[in-house]
Image: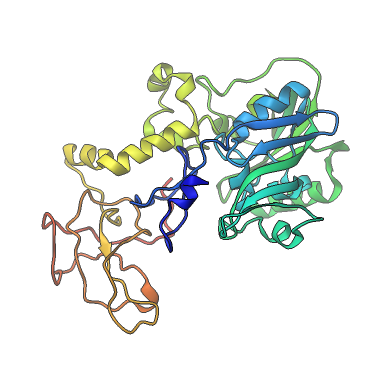
Amino acid sequence: MDSYRAIPPNSPVRLAKPTSNLFRARDRSAVKGLDVSGLTGVIAVDAEARTADVAGMCTYEDLVAATLPHALAPLVVPQLKTITLGGAVTGLGIESTSFRNGLPHESVLEMDILTGAGEIVTASPEQHADLFRTFPNSYGTLGYSTRLRIELEPVTPFVALRHLRFHTLDALVAAMDRIIETGGLDGQPVDYLDGVVFSADESYLCVGFKTTTPGPVSDYTGQDIYYRSIQHADGEKHDRLTIHDYLWRWDTDWFWCSRAFGAQNPTIRRFWPRRLRRSSFYWKLVGYDQRFNIADRIEKRNGRRRANGWCRTSRCHWRTADNSSTGSWRTCRSNRSGCARCDYVKTTATVPGGRCIPFARTTPTSTSGSGRRCPSARSKGTPTS
């Protein structure tokens, strides 16, 4: 609570934690965040009651490590290891069990919540029921969870997979609807259900079944890559993973984003330490790039520049909420990666409602910094991978 009291009045409250799973850059804040270093880890696992008490900043990686020895797992395990229980509940989490178990907050039995008033209250269906009902998906606006009690479900040592290939998205959706409606495929209960789309004419349903039968298993923490293993020409393809490797199948290559760091190159992958083949390490690499403009420097050295991007260090024109006068110059948070250290071009254009202006290659009204101009902005909806 000392770190909470140290935050100046009227300042936003942020969590001071070493990991994040945001896919966007955030500005550094001069205001110290809320110290949550003591809110990590698993408090207790009750194997008989099939429940777990966890701290709000406990990662799913730590929780799964504590529950699997009891042949139990959370009802929903989001794909990335460093996603926290508190983050998945107050934010959003989803995975291949969601078609039968819903979202992470639906298996929460009670929570201790630090509210904006600086009080910690226990919320459940019986006490502080309004807060318990509205806290999920509130994205920190109602407070932060410091402890959660959640349900667990039995799991088996292995997961058998059937990757079903579809040539149209309509066919995939129809098959998915049938599985969800009946709860099974070819008379066998389905436990896990994923959909992966490579293109309009290449998509897959990855259907998983719990099994105790021992046998060969695939390993996608080595040279092989999970998302590539799904692909095949027609019909279906079978695979088999341990329950541990199934839960973290997407984390090893950060879905497919490890390709951007060269980690899918067979030669580089051979020398890339296994312990660093994980989403949290790739996220750190992105942070280093944003801080030191590494990719931009490499592009410049190769005689290229990043065209049609938004400058991450540029500023935008801002207007006050009532749109009556020009407000302060703010760092534009909606920028995508663009040119390195642009000149903070200022513009005289009016921005209703305080929106950011992407910088076009026009003659600036005034400039500061190096005097270089940003490339023209590209559409925000353009995917980068």
Left or right of 143 in this view: 311: left
Q: In the image, residue 184 lies at what x, y percent?
A: 84, 41
Residue at x 25%, y 64% (from the top left corner): 359
Nearest the viewer among 151 and 153 is: 151
* Front-most of residues 52 and 37: 37
In which quadrant will I find the C terminus? top left
Residue 281's x, y, as percent?
Answer: 44, 31
Residue 315 can be seen in this image: yes
- In the rendered image, residue 147, in percent from the top left (x then y), is placed at 66, 42
Q: Does 30 sit left or right of 50 as displayed?
A: left
Q: Is residue 222 above or below residue 30?
A: above
Residue at image location 11% in from the left, 54% down from the top? 370
User: For residue 54, what is the image quadrant?
Assistant: top right
Q: Residue furthest right?
A: 187
Quadrant of residue 166 in the image? top right
Counting the numbered discs, the total is 0
Task: Give left or right: position of 357 versus 346.
Answer: right
Specify the farthest residue to the left. Answer: 371
| Residue 248 in sight | no
Residue beneath the point at 73% across and 41% down: 149
Q: Position of residue 174 (x, y in %)?
A: 74, 53
Question: Looking at the image, which residue sits at the far bottom?
Answer: 324
Q: How is the image coloured?
A: rainbow
Tell me what residue is drawn at x 17 percent, y 37 percent: 301
Which of the two residues, 261 or 312, is positioned nearer the viewer here? Answer: 312
Q: Nearer the viewer, residue 239 or 331?
A: 331
